[in-house]
Each structure stands twice: as C-alpha cells, then as structure tokens.
Amino acid sequence: MSPWLTRKLALPLHEWLLGRPTFRILNEIRPHGRCDPAEMIAAQRARLQQVFDHARRHIPWWRNRLDAAPQIVEDPREALAGVPVLTRTEIQNHLEEMRWPDPPVKLIKHISGGTTDDNLEFYCGRERQTWNRAVRYRALERLGVRPGDPELHLWPHFPADSTTQRFKDLVREVRDWVTNDTVLDLRPFSDRQFERAIGRLSRYQRTVLFAYPSWVLRLADYWKRRQSSPVPGLGCVYCTGEVLHDSHRNVITRILGVPVYEEYGSQETGSIANEDSDHAFRLNTEHVLVEILRAGKPAAPGELGEIVVTNLTAVLMPFIRYATGDVARQPADPSFPVNDGLLPLFPRVEGRTSDLLLSTDGRLLPSRPLVDDLVTEARLEWFHLHQTSSSRVELHLLTSSSDRRPVAETILRSHLGAALEIEVCEGTAFTPLRSGKHRFVCSPAAAVRIAHDRYLDDELARAWPQPVVTSFAN
C-alpha cells in the first residue's frame, strides 16, 4: 500500500481499533528529542510513583516487595534502591502472583524469543505496547523513516497448531499488507528463503529491514555470492535481538550498501535505547528508567554491570528493577544526565552476562574486541567460543575454516592470556537454536560473576553453548 495512505489512514485506524493511542503519544514525545533535565527527572518521578501506587493497591505480591522502598522525593533511583532486583527465575516462579488479578482492560500473555531459547512468559497491556511503538517511531523518524514507510521484519514464526491460530495468521498477513509491515521467517536458511527476502525488499523504495544481526549476515553472504551492487529497494538495516559487532556491521554495510543501526531493548521491558544517525544511543527516558548494577549496587564508573530496567508504562504486570541479563559499562554519571539538550546518551551494550569472558588471571572482559579480531584478522565468518573456566576455552569452527586455526589461537591467547588452554572442535554446521540466532560466545564462567540471577549453571539455557555438529576434538 502507498506509504502516504498507510501513514494517514491504515496505521491510525489499526492503532485505534486496538485501543492504542500510539500517534497521540508520538506527538507528545516528539519534542522530547530535545530534553530539559529537570523536566525529565520530574516526569520519571511522577510515572514511577504511579507504578508504585498501582502495584501497591492492586497486586499483593508487589505490595510486599515495595514495603522497603522509600518515598520518591528527588532522584527516582534513590527510591528504587530499596527494592530487590527482579530476576527471570522469580518471574518463572511467581508469574501469576505478579500481575493485576482482575484488570478492567485486556491482559495479553507474551512469550519472549530468548537468544538462548530460554523463553520467558509474561503479561503486558495495550499501554505498554503503545509506548513501545511510539518511542520506536520517534527513533526511526530521527533516521528519516516515517510511520507507514515499508518495513520488512525477519523473525522466527512458529507454525500454527490449531484452526484458530491459522485464522489469526491469515488476519496478520492481511494486516501486514495494509500497514506495510511484513514479517518473514528465513528458517530453514536457504538460497530460496534469501531470494524471497530480496524479492520483498525490491517491491518498494527505501524499505527498512529489521532483523537479528546473524540473519542479516546470512542474507548478506547470499547477496555477495549473487551480486556486487546494493540490494534494490533497501534503505537501511535496523538490528536488534543480538549483539551487533563492529566487524559484522562493517560487513553488512559493505555488501548491502546501506547504513546499519541498532535498537536495544527486550520483549519484557520494550525499547530501551535507539541508535541515531551519528551512531550514539539515546535512552527512552519517558518509557524506562535504567540502572547498571553489580550485586544490586550501582557499578563504579567504567565498570561492567548488569542492565536493570524499570518500565514506567507497565502496570498490569509491573517490571520494577528487572535484571535483563545484559551488560554495559557504567558511565561517568550513573543518572544518565542530559548534557547536550537531547535525550540522554546510553552506553553501548556489551552483550549478555554469558557473552563476557574471563581472562586467565580472573579479569572480566567484554567479548566484542575478541570477536571483532577473530572476524577481521583470522577471517572467521562463523565460530563459537564456550568458556567454562578462566583457564580453558572451546573454539568451535567449521571444517572449511580449519586453516585459520593457528591465527585464531594466537588471538585468543593475546586477549585472554598466554596460558589459556584451547580445545578446538570442528564440524560441518552449528547446532541450531530454536530462535534461529547464533551465539558467538557463551561463558557460564563469566555469567556467574556478574548476573543477578544466581540460578545459573550449564544445564540452563542462558549457559547453553552452540557447538558444531559432526564435531571432533583436536
């Protein structure tokens, strides 16, 4: 459909039918691209007070949990300091207790598409959906993309198992056509599937491609084998759901011929920060309140810590101090101040807690520099590192990359320590995750050092490796 018609008619009608005032919220927050510090803190304080009041009034589980929280006076983070950090394990154990038992509005049950297949069930409402869509529209507008412009989403879609579900899928297909918002599942990965994606992109001009970075890498590899020109119809790539490494960003940009941007968020808490055209991340302060913590306390400036999020628009099932399982470095000012008149800057996410690595002398290290060196210097396209102790790493390679093993081992020891023990496993393919994502790093040894959810071990999905199949150890 015409982007103009979609923007002026189809999308507003779609949101109205679902009871989501998305475009009213978007109009309200557009000026917040320029942000006054005092107004920002006041708005966060007011929204957090509303979340607290509602949780205490309607949800006994949260009423008990918020007992120790002090009155919200100045910085809302001071009030949050008295609330325990919320973990995935707690949500799994207390899901039904954590929600509003008899809400007057629709309660929607979601299942997150976890990178490590450890999907989490949770509830949300239209209000949280509305804010999530509005802040994403605002971020896309800063890149020159307007609501109604064509979008192609490459996500997993699981086959319908009932007549009702098949009917819903049919309705979604019609909706996607009307809203210029198409969803396509590339699994099982094949040239035929990649050609379908290219065909969808070429139908329009300046289509935005939303996808996991590893899926875009596969699409770029296909396009490199087929063509040397930019993909027709593609305007930019918007990555989310996985770590976007600099080396992979460069590969995608070079092959597909368009800029690549990144969104950071989670299905549980919604969009947290979005990358601007200058590649700085801007925090969605109206929607979320973010802390970077170590053992429940603010990490020191420059120190790695787990990202803990409080959603300011989720009341049907509050997410207060939710440990996302992701890691970033604490900025110099942990309050994320406004210092250039725009939305606060947000540090680059280093990955999940199990994406970090341990050096042989016990230091906790981000894996980004190591992965980038393995891609650019060892010329490894696909690999997997699995670390169960600071002294030992498994390097999983495809047999086609076996000649690059000596360089890879040198790089590993230069980053993690000369005494590092390396076991190399080779195979013809990697064990697929249900989500279709690819894990370049998995370090249970690092995760237990920084994660707030202490229920972590090799048997749990967040510590699952992604080994090669038909592999053998050398």
Image (cartoon, rainbow, N blue to C red):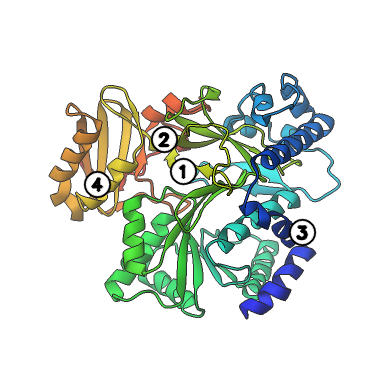
Please give left or right for residue 16 compared with residue 225 in the image: right
Q: Residue at x 34, y 39 (%)?
A: 367
Secondary structure, mark 2, is: helix
Query: In the displayed structure, does residue 360 sit left or right of residue 119?
Result: left
Check whether the beta carbons of the residues at disc 2 and disc 1 lie within 8 A of each other. Answer: yes
**Disc 3 residue type (three-letter):** Pro
Q: Residue at x 70, y 44 (%)?
A: 123
Label 1, on which residue? 116
Q: Which residue is mark 2?
A: 354
Q: Position of residue 459 (x, y in %)?
A: 44, 32
Question: Viewed as shown, does residue 244 lie left or right of 15?
Answer: left
User: Residue sitting at 29 percent across and 52 percent down?
Assistant: 382
Q: Nearer the viewer, residue 297 or 473?
A: 297
Disc 2 vs disc 1: which is toward the camera? 2
Mark 4, mark 1: which one is toward the viewer?
Answer: 4
- The residue under the point 51% across, 22% down is 295
Find the distance from the CA under tag 4 to the CA under tag 1.
22 Å
| Residue 334: image location, x then y, percent | 54, 31
- Disc 2 to disc 3, C-alpha distance: 38 Å
Residue at which label 4 appears? 374
- Mark 3 highlights which residue? 21
Where does the C terminus fall, quadrant-wise? top left
Q: Label 3 to label 4, Cα distance in Å?
A: 46 Å
Q: N-terminal of the two: label 4 or label 2?
A: 2
